[in-house]
Image: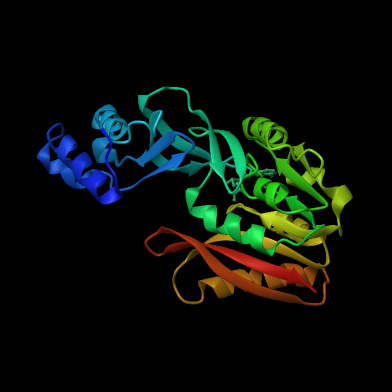
């Protein structure tokens, strides 16, 4: 079945599912889906869990030729290593894939690791702002989500990418080779709190792509920067007025403790997480 356009696909998915699930559940049919490589991911509400394989088969049918597998996101991303909660729905059970984006190839196990399609704009923005010969530290690399595109599209002096999850680290190493950027990007396995001391005061840019970082890690990010360097802190912030001010104050306090004279700070929304919650990136320039 070759169907073009999301609207017509939505209508067909509804039609096919309405015949197979109780009518009182039809309002829970997912309206959106996304791809990591050829793995199609659908958010599955708990009301439809008993029908998850039916759901998967319908999506596979409608996305024929594009999706090799369908996995369902059934809960939030958990733990320090940010494991997403996915269940198999239909197609091939193997969730390893190669996602192509911004001139790069990201090999990843799409059901066990995070790669947010909503961060595409931020990945693109970084490519646009990074200058030639920068030394960049990616403190929370996963498979190279934020830093690999910079190694591929920019001409950094060096990128140091740290990852604590052995599975993500394995893919990070493979992706550096797959994209032939070994001459400008290295992967370090371990806890960023303990493996970066030799780089203090050297970074032009630090990527802090993690919502649960603690103050020790925020301090480290600032310590890694040279004068004039920049840290990109990612946070989930309530859309309420003044919530961004709290984060700015928190960063200002850390910077004051580090006895650095001054900072410039700007922020922008990366994506909406849920009603009232935004993913914000704070660009902090250390003067
Ligand atoms: C949510 S992912 C984000 C990936 C990427 N930075 C992005 O923004 O798309 C965060 C990654 O940081 C890793 N991580 C968490 N704590 C860490 C630590 N202390 N040291 C190194 N990596 C860590 C997790 O295993 C996970 O792969």
Residue shown at 83% from the left, 52% from the top: 157
Could one spot residue 260 in this view of the protein?
yes
Farthest-out residue, top: 93
x%, y% of residue 95? Answer: 48, 28
Residue shown at 14% from the left, 38% from the top: 18
x%, y% of residue 107? Answer: 59, 33
Residue 206, located in which quarter of the rendered image? bottom right
Q: How is the image coloured?
A: rainbow
Residue shown at 63% from the left, 50% from the top: 146
* Ligand 1: image quarter: top right
- Position of residue 118 in the picture relative to residue 151 (left or right): left
Instruction: Point out the image quarter for the N terminus.
Output: top left
Could one spot residue 113 in this view of the protein?
no
Residue shown at 44% from the left, 72% from the top: 240
x%, y% of residue 9? Answer: 25, 44
Figure check: 199 above or below 168: below
**190 vs 104, nearest the viewer:** 104
x%, y% of residue 53? Answer: 28, 27
Number of numbered discs overlaid on the protein picture? 0
**173 vs 272, nearest the viewer:** 173
Farthest-out residue, right: 198
- Position of residue 42 in the picture relative to residue 79 (left or right): left
Figure check: 207 above or below 111: below
Instruction: Point out the image quarter for the C terminus.
Output: bottom right
**38 vs 192, nearest the viewer:** 38
């Amino acid at each position: 079945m070759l169907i073009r356009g999301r609207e017509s696909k939505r209508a067909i998915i509804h039609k096919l599912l309405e015949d197979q699930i109780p009518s009182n559940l039809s309002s829970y049919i997912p309206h959106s889906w996304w791809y990591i490589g050829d793995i199609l991911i659908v958010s599955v509400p708990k009301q439809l869990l008993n029908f998850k394989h039916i759901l998967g088969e319908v999506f596979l049918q409608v996305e024929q030729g594009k999706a090799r597998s369908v996995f369902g996101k059934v809960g939030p991303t958990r733990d320090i290593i940010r494991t997403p909660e996915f269940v198999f729905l239909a197609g091939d059970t193997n969730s390893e894939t190669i996602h192509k984006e911004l001139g790069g190839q990201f090999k990843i196990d799409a059901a066990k690791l995070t790669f947010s399609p909503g961060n595409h704009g931020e990945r693109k923005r970084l490519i646009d702002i990074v200058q030639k010969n920068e030394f960049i530290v990616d403190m929370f690399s996963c498979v190279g989500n934020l830093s690999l595109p910079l190694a591929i599209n920019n001409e950094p002096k060096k990128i140091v990418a740290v990852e604590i999850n052995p599975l993500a680290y394995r893919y990070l190493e493979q992706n550096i080779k797959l994209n032939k950027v070994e001459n400008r990007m290295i992967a370090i396995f371990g806890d960023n709190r303990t493996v970066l001391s030799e780089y203090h005061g050297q970074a032009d840019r630090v990527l802090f792509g993690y919502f649960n970082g603690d103050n020790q890690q925020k301090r480290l990010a600032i310590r890694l920067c040279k004068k004039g360097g920049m840290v990109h802190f990612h946070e989930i912030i309530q859309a309420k007025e003044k919530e961004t001010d709290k984060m700015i104050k928190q960063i200002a306090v850390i910077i004051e403790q580090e006895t650095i004279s001054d900072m410039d700070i700007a922020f922008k929304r990366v994506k909406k997480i849920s009603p009232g919650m935004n993913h914000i990136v704070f660009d902090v320039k250390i003067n």
